[in-house]
Amino acid sequence: MVVVFTWLLAYLARQPTSFQALSKKTWIFLVLSGLGTGLSWLCYSHALQIGPASRVAPLDKLSVAIVIGTNASCPDATLSAVLSPTPAQKESSQ
């Protein structure tokens, strides 16, 4: 469901040639990210079925700390690259 909704939003918000502009590396990352998200939800659902939520939920929230720690250990990874608008976005907002 997440993948369908995300693709719908991406399609509705896209620029006319934006899908062709994505590199092969970007497509691979998007597919792997989608698979990782799906598997994560399946594992979380299974963990909730076999264990109490009071023990499962804190482990799920720990993943945020792991992501932050992983990003901190990668000197080339910057959040500003994700948050700063592209030149096309700057033009469209004016």
Image (spheres, helix red, strand yellow):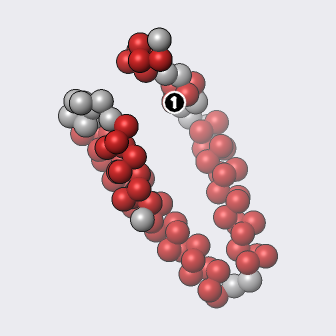
Which of 57/88 is in front?
88
Amino acid type at mark 1 = Val
Circle 1 residues within 10 Å: few <14, some 14–19, many ≥20? few
Q: Residue furthest right?
A: 54
Q: Residue tagged by mark 1? A: 82
Please provide percent x and percent y for residue 3. 39, 58
Q: Quadrant of residue 86?
A: top left
Q: Residue at x 59, y 39 (%)?
A: 71
**Up-down: is 65 above or below 57?**
above
17 sits left or right of 89 in the view: left
**Up-down: is 18 above or below 8?**
above
Which of 83/50 is in front?
83
Q: Residue at x 50, y 74 (%)?
A: 42
86 sits left or right of 43 in the view: left
Please provide percent x and percent y for residue 14. 32, 35
Please provide percent x and percent y for residue 57. 72, 69
Q: Residue at x 57, y 77 (%)?
A: 45
Residue 53 seen in the current view:
yes
Which of 84/40 is in front?
84
| Quarter of the image that includes the N terminus | bottom left
Please provide percent x and percent y for residue 79. 58, 30
Q: Residue furthest bottom?
A: 50
Residue 78 seen in the current view:
no
